[in-house]
Image (cartoon, rainbow, N blue to C red):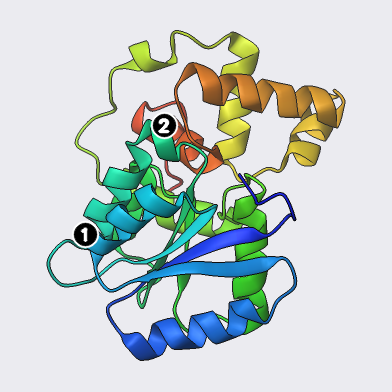
Amino acid sequence: MNDDDGQIRVLLADDQALVRAGFRALLDAQPGITIVGEAKDGADAARLADALTPDVVLMDIRMPGVDGLEATRRITASARLSATRVVILTTFDLDEYVFEAIRVGASGFLVKDTEPADLVQAVRVVARGDALLSPGVTRRLIAEFAGHLRRPAPTARLDVLTDREREVVALVAAGLSNAEIADRLVVSPATAKTHVSRAMAKVNARDRAQLVVLAYETGLVRPQAR
């Protein structure tokens, strides 16, 4: 959904004007990235996302009124915004709100004091359709809260997957990249990518982050004991 000139279009959502100004100054200075709008709360973010159809929304999770979680729900539920990716901004790297945001379709999260270069890289990673969940984050965040689930969700959600696709989803949940999945299964990277893409399509996952959540919620994989 990039512009014809290849620009990654970013919407900023944060209730603090100084934070938005800092992110704007940083990102507007990068080649290939442009800020298309700023929102001061979740309602504003959802409205502007619908109007501007950005590639990436940098979303503060805690805002007055409509918060970032509800705004993420609205954006990810919109067919019009199926290609828009949401990155959650938080001051807490293990936050139940963050987990819920990923459950409903956010592509990952960043702590607000992340290094500028990491923020820029995150925008580029998410814009090309990858989830912003490193193996370490996958283990810590997803397993932390999935471990608190009362019981696995009905496994019928996985019935649409082939045995190989289930295996691939489990490897995604373990934090493996497509190249690492290919090595593990002794297939080509292209084949691994195809398996991941098909699994995502079958279970209506927006990206790999939702595959990870699905794997834990259905009991396909279990949080590791500490």
**Residue 103 shows in the view:** yes
**Residue at the spot x=21%, y=59% of the render?**
43
Please state which of residues 127 and 131 is positioned toward the viewer in this rendering: 127
**Residue 213 shows in the view:** no
Which of the numbered marks, if any, corresponds to residue 11? none
Quarter of the rendering occupied by the C terminus: bottom left
Q: CA distance from mark 2 to mark 1?
A: 28 Å
Q: Pointer 1: what residue?
A: 43
Please state which of residues 150 and 198 is positioned toward the viewer in this rendering: 198
**Residue at the spot x=44%, y=24% of the render?**
204
**Residue at the spot x=51%, y=52% of the render?**
138
Q: Identity of the amino acid at label 2? A: Leu
Label 2 residue SS: helix
Quadrant hosting residue 203: top left
Give the image location of residue 24, x and y in percent: 52, 80
**Where is 42 relative to 111, above or below?**
above
Q: Pointer 2: what residue?
A: 214
Please state which of residues 46 and 115 is positioned toward the viewer in this rendering: 46
Quarter of the rendering occupied by the N terminus: top right
**Where is 172 relative to 134, above or below?**
above
Closer to the chain start, of discs 2 and 1, is 1
Label 1 residue SS: helix
Give the image location of residue 178, x and y in percent: 74, 37
**Where is 80 relative to 107, above or below?**
above
Q: Identity of the amino acid at label 1? A: Ala
The outermost residue toward the bottom is 18
